[in-house]
Amino acid sequence: MDHECFLYYLPYSAEDERRGMVCTTAGDIIVEPYTEYPPNKNSHPAAFRTVADGRVLPEFQIVYISEGEGCFSTALKQYPVKAGSLLLILPGMQHSYKPVYETGWHEYWVGFTGEFFLSLLEKGILSPDCVFFETGMRDCIALIFNQIFDEVRSQKPLYQFKVCAAIFSLISEVVSYERRKEQPSYHQRVVERAKCIMESNIFGIINVEGIALKTGMSASGLNKIFKIYTSMTLYQYYIQIKIHKAKELLEHADLSVKEIAARLGFDDQYYFSRLFKNKTGIAPSKWRDFIYPDRS
C-alpha cells in the first residue's frame, strides 16, 4: 500500500496559549500488517512511544481509525476497535491502543490542550465516561482531519487558531452524533411537532401538558427528549421564540412595549421587560434605538 506518513509535533507561542487552545500534534499513518506499533517509534517523543503498552498524556488526543481493527484500553474498560471507531484521550487518563498485528490499521490523530478544551471537560461536554465512539465511516470526520493537516502543513499566520477551530468542529460532530444516535427517529418528529405547536401559539400561554397530549407523550417525557435535542426545556424554548417575536414587533410595528407584552401573553409588562433585557442585554424600550441608531 503506497501511503506517505504524515506526522507533526507542533510548537506554539504565548499568543496561542492566551487563546486557551493549541494543537500539539497531528498525524495520519497506515500501519501495515505484521508491523511493530507504533512504526518508527523513535520519531515520536518519549512520552508517546508507549502507546501500545500503556501511557498517560498531559493533553487531549482524538484518534480515528478508518481501516483495520485493534483494541483500546483504559483503566476501566477495554474496547474492540474497528473501521469507524474514534478514541478520545483525556489528560491524565491511563490508556493504550494498538492494531491487530495481522491486520494493521489506518489511523488519524490530533493532539490538543488549553483552557478552552479543559473547560469542555469541566462542564461535562467531554467526559471520562464517554471516550469511545463508534461513528462508522463518515466522510465529514476524515474531511475535518484533512483540513487540520492542510493547515499544519502550510503553517500560515494564525494556523493554530484555524486548526483549533477545526478540532472544535470535530468534537462537535462526534458529540452531537452520539447524542442523536441514542434517540429513536420518532423522537425527532415529536420534537419538531412540539416546536410547531409552540410557534403556532406564539401569542398564547405555554401549556406543557397540552403540548405533550398533542404529541402523544407525557409532559416529563416530552421535556426530557426536547432538552436532548435543543438543550432547552419546552418553557425555555417558548420564551426564546417569544423574545424573537418581540424583537420583530419592536422593529416593525408601531406598538408600545406594554402592547407587545400583552400581545405575547405577558400580563406583567415589567416582568416582560426584565426577561427581554436578561435575554438580549437591552431593554425593550431601547431596542428600536439599538437597531436603528440613525432614525430620528
Image (cartoon, rainbow, N blue to C red):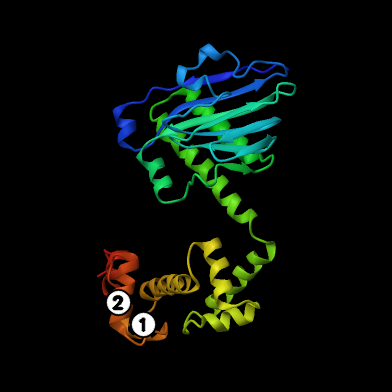
Q: Residue furthest front?
A: 76
Question: Residue 152 location in percent, x, y?
Answer: 48, 25
Question: Residue 87 location in percent, x, y?
Answer: 58, 37
Element at label 2? helix
User: In this orientation, which residue lies closer to the viewer: 109 or 291?
Assistant: 109
Q: Which mark is residue 77?
A: none
Left of 228 or right of it: where is 258?
A: left
Left of 31 or right of it: where is 284?
A: left
Element at label 1? helix
Q: Residue furthest left?
A: 296
Residue flagged by tag 2: what amino acid is it?
Ser
Residue at 67% x, 32% y: name it.
66
84 versus 125 height, above or below: above
**Among the 4 quarters of the image, the one containing residue 12:** top left
164 versus 264 height, above or below: above
Residue occupied by mark 1: 261
Residue at 54% x, 62% y: name it.
228
Circle 2 crowding by C-alpha within 10 Å: few under 14, some 14–19, many from 20: some
Question: Residue 30 location in percent, x, y?
Answer: 66, 22
Residue occupied by mark 2: 273
Question: Residue 174 location in percent, x, y?
Answer: 57, 45
Dots 1, 2 in contact, CB < 8 A? yes
Mark 1–mark 2 Cα distance, whole angstroms, equals 8 Å
33 versus 66 height, above or below: above
Split into 4 quadrants, where in the image is the C terminus? bottom left
Left of 265 or right of it: where is 175?
A: right
Residue flagged by tag 1: what amino acid is it?
Ala
Circle 1 crowding by C-alpha within 10 Å: few under 14, some 14–19, many from 20: many
